[in-house]
Image (cartoon, rainbow, N blue to C red):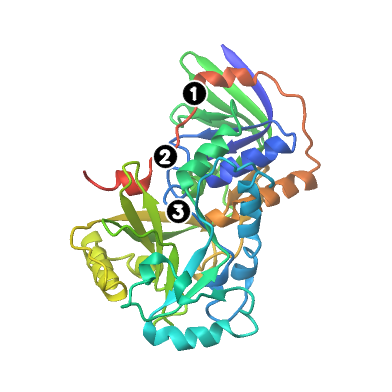
Amino acid sequence: MRHEVKVDISIIGGGIAGLWLLNRLQQAGYSAVLFEQADLGSDQTIASQGMIHGGLKYALSGIINGSSEAVAEMPALWQRCIDGEGEVDLSKTKLLSKEFNMWSTGSAGSKLTSFFATKAMRGRINKLKRPDYPQVFQNKAFAGNVYRLVDIVLDVPSLLNNLKSNCPGRIFSIDWQQAQFQQQQDGSVSALEIKHGDDIIAIAAQQHVFTAGKGNGDLMAMLNLQQPKMQIRPLQQVMVKHSNDFDLYAHCVDFSLSTSPRLTVSSHRSDDGSLTWYLGGDLATNGLNDSPEQLINKAKREMNTLFPWLDFSDAQWTTISVDRAEPKQSSLSKPDQAFAQVSDAAANVIVAWPTKLTLAPDLADKVIASLQDAALSPQPTANIEALEVLGCPTVANKVWDKNFEY
């Protein structure tokens, strides 16, 4: 049998971008469904450190640019959602930390203090007194300075579960070995056809939105779309599971080395209570071409240098590689904002990348604005229940658990 399904919006890709967009569209009155081939959030999203930042780390060069200003309001927006008062209900999302810190090594302290006192930085960051330092920096061996940012940190698995639970009956699994797009002569998509047993489920949507990260490349190839172009910026990060029971969410800054964070640390607990520090910053960016063993050795030296009072002798170490998919930029530079663009060759296809977890709300705003520009309004739906046979994908496992061998 052939089952005809009619919806307003079909979203392909179940990471933070697709799930946030689904929530927004549902609240706006659109009939939207989402399809995901793997687990929800299985690539870039689950590998995120969960930081919702206000762009200050991009302003360390002294220039308040698009990267810093585009995300300036994001922590407050996300906090409203966590409080149940925002555009998406995140009241079931676990908040790991209400603040993020920045610390300097002793040698870099004076220069950093002078920088944060400049007009550009005033009011954007607060220097802490020693009694207010995170516990890990209370040791007498620590000789640097600590600052408080407005950034917050979320538990990503609980975020994914929260967004999923807000949209029951709207998220479905898809096997692309059994699915294909049907196109009209003008290149637009007439239907997404999914074979299930002897049946065909044909989904007709006013608009199809691709939010599949690096999977957008495969989706565009299916439709022979040449624009927009995608870039991949790989990253290799280190995780260390250790017995030092200090939660830490902070950037280390050393202007003698770089104007970007030397090291970024976020803390994640397993179900058994064990603690993993997830390490990013320049350590991860500059370690892209290292073998896992080489990068782990660099991380060990870095941790011994920055935390000489801590014992990592019994720690477990591992690495994780992440492909950050984004709209193509000159020289593979980092995009400033979320991206959503209607394809020139398929008028009812929008290709989108959030570029970072923080900017998922910005991506949804851009997609909804595009729908409004096209005067696309909610229309009567048909036969959505036919999709139930596809099942619903589960949320991806925690990377700080599955990447360690027990």
Q: Looking at numbered disc 3 in the image, what kind of residue is underneath it?
A: Ser
What residue do we see at 45% from left, 76% from top?
Answer: 130
Give how far apart the Cα atoms at labels 3 and 2 are.
12 Å
Return the mark for residue 48: 3
> Is residue 186 at all visible to an observer of this figure?
no
Which residue position is annotated with label 2?
396
**Left or right for 113, reference 369:** left
What residue do we see at 59% from left, 84% from top?
Answer: 117
Return the mark for residue 10: none
Q: Looking at numbered disc 2 in the image, what kind of residue is underneath it?
A: Ala
Disc 1 vs disc 2: which is toward the camera? 2
Farthest right residue? 375
Label 2 Cα crowd, 10 Å radius (few <14 / some 14-19 / many 20+): many
Q: Is residue 194 above or below residue 322?
A: above
Residue 265 is situated, as x and y percent measured from the top left of the image, at 39, 63
- For marks 1 and 2, the one nearer the N-term is 1
Mark 1–mark 2 CB contact (< 8 Å): no
Q: Is residue 354 above or below residue 393?
A: below
Residue 211 is situated, as x and y percent measured from the top left of the image, at 56, 45
Which residue position is annotated with label 1?
391
Give how far apart the Cα atoms at labels 1 and 2 are.
16 Å
